[in-house]
Image (cartoon, grey):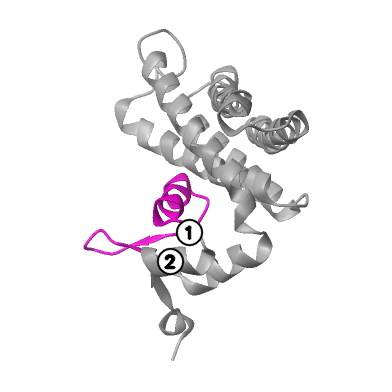
Amino acid sequence: MNDQDEVIYLSLSAASKLLGVHSTTLRRWADAGAVPVYITPGGHRRFARADIDGLAARHPLAGQAIGSTWANKALAVTRGGISHAQDRPGWMSRLPEDERAAWRRIGQQLMGVVLRYINSPHDDEGLLVEARMIGTDYARHARHTGMELTAALEAALFFRDSLVDAAMDMPEEAHLRPEASARLIKRISRVANEVHLAVAAGYQD
């Protein structure tokens, strides 16, 4: 029997109960890229038991309410920003329609890493390495489409600003204390810095 055969999959409901969160919360985390999810041919979400156990072991889920609220806000801010960016000169207006799906995928990956990083009680170097890999992939794709470095950084800054703007609005909605809000923004910036440095390095190679 190979490793694939030994994987135990959980339904959305079963995984939510194991984590002690509502199913809609776990669905949001999965859609934001913070939790690995597998979609069946019938459109149902399935979660590997090992992934759920690992998530539960890394940090208490009660503290994830902040990250979940931020992720929902960030998704709304990003989508609104993209909608407006399409109507004015800039990197988005120059991007072919068939390429935008790739940018959305990269943005979802970045948001997933940030969400996991802000919920981690420690500075997880593994997540920072993942952020650098996203930046490298982003630079490779940008160069392939003929995008200049300035435009690539403009797009990266757009995503960064969207994530920070969502965090800036958090104190009002989530009743965050100033120190918690400052930590949130600092950790978002920490991940974004790794992405930006990787983008610049990708254009130098």
**Spot occupied by residue 172 in the image (x, y as percentages of width and height):** 59, 24
What type is the residue that disc 2 sits on? Phe
Q: Among all residues in the image, which is located at the extreme top?
A: 89
**Looking at the image, do the residues carrying marks 2 and 1 touch, with CB atoms under 8 Å apart?**
yes
What type is the residue that disc 1 sits on? Pro
Considering depth in this image, is 100 or 186 the residue closer to the camera?
186
Q: Quadrant of the N terminus?
A: bottom left
How far is the residue under mark 2 from the one under mark 1? 7 Å
Up the image or down, 205 lies above or below 82; here it is: below
Considering depth in this image, is 17 or 196 the residue closer to the camera?
17
Q: Quadrant of the C terminus?
A: top right
Q: Is residue 144 visible?
A: no
Considering depth in this image, is 80 or 66 the residue closer to the camera?
66
Mark 2 crowd level (few <14, some 14–19, many ≥20, 10 Å Cα): many
Tell me, yes or no, whether the highlighted magenta stretch contains residue 25: yes
Q: Among all residues in the image, which is located at the extreme bottom?
A: 1
**Spot occupied by residue 197 in the image (x, y as percentages of width and height):** 71, 33
Name the residue tied to disc 1. 36
Name the residue tied to disc 2. 47
Report how many numbered discs are placed on residues in the image.
2
